[in-house]
Amino acid sequence: MTEKVQGPKSYFPSIEAKYGQPIDHWMTLLDENALELTHMNQVGWLKDNHGFGHGHANALVAVFRKERNL
């Protein structure tokens, strides 16, 4: 039986549907263009450059930073 995804990753299906790209695409963009930024600056970068809403950007950045031990 599959466990229900909780926490920031629970936003991923909505992010993919709304912004038209897989999560790996956004993680790669953060790696290439915003790695040196703080959490909130990365959130702002996604909002300003890619039209993300705050909740989606924050969830994506939270997972991005956790997976990279930032």
Image (cartoon, rainbow, N blue to C red):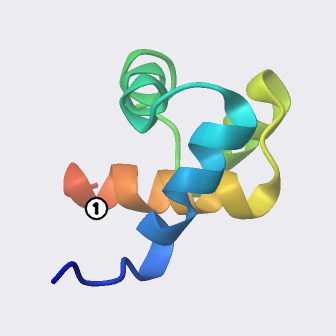
The spot of residue 10 in percent (x, y) is 49, 70
Image quadrant where one finds the C terminus: bottom left
Question: Along the horizontal axis of the image, is 47 left or right of 25?
Answer: right
Question: Along the horizontal axis of the image, is 57 left or right of 59?
Answer: right
Q: Residue at x 58, y 39 (%)?
A: 16
Q: Secondary structure at mark 1?
A: helix
Image quadrant where one finds the N terminus: bottom left
Would residue 42 be seen by someone viewing this image from the given angle? no
Q: Residue at x 21, y 78 (%)?
A: 2
Residue type of the residue flagged with mark 1:
Lys
Mark 1, Cα crowd under 10 Å, few <14 / some 14-19 / many 20+, is few
Q: Residue at x 46, y 29 (%)?
A: 30
Q: Residue at x 67, y 56 (%)?
A: 56
Asked whether 4 or 49 is in front, the reply is: 4
Would residue 24 be seen by someone viewing this image from the given angle? yes
Question: On the image, numbered disc 1 is attached to which residue?
Answer: 66
